[in-house]
Image (cartoon, helix red, strand yellow):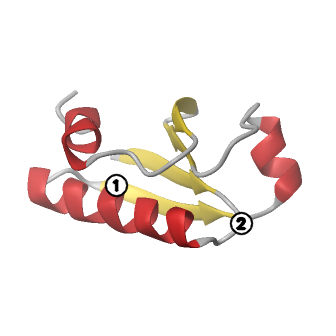
Amino acid sequence: MKDVKILGSGCANCKATYKVVEEAAKAKGAEIALEKVEDLGRIMGYGVMSTPGVVIDGQVVHAGGVPDRKTVEAWFDR
């Protein structure tokens, strides 16, 4: 199971990122633990200055803007 965190304030792009990650993981049959992180201190702790950010198993894989579906699906091919 992958630990996935969506970093952001809860803006529209953050919500869209959460949804695309959730849908892509389901489509790929990947088991994930998905969490929204809205605490600015925790977000800064990952070094993310532009949200939304995506962290998988402790590694920042995306920051700034909504990632496209193909990119997100590739994260779950590993």
Location of residue 60 in the rendering, given as x and y in whole percent from the top left corner: 56, 31
What's the residue at 82%, 41% (across, down)?
44
What's the residue at 55%, 55% (across, down)?
6
| Label 2 secondary element | loop
| Label 1 secondary element | strand
Q: What type is the residue that disc 2 sits on? A: Ser
> In the image, is residue 15 above or below residue 73?
below
Location of residue 12 in the rendering, given as x and y in whole percent from the top left corner: 54, 72
Residue with the most extreme right position:
41
Location of residue 61 in the rendering, given as x and y in whole percent from the top left corner: 48, 31
Location of residue 27 in the rendering, given as x and y in whole percent from the top left corner: 11, 58
| Quadrant in which residue 26 is drawn | bottom left
Out of 1 and 73, give the one closest to the viewer: 73
Dot 2 corresponds to which residue? 9
Dot 1 corresponds to which residue? 32
What's the residue at 19%, 41% (across, down)?
70
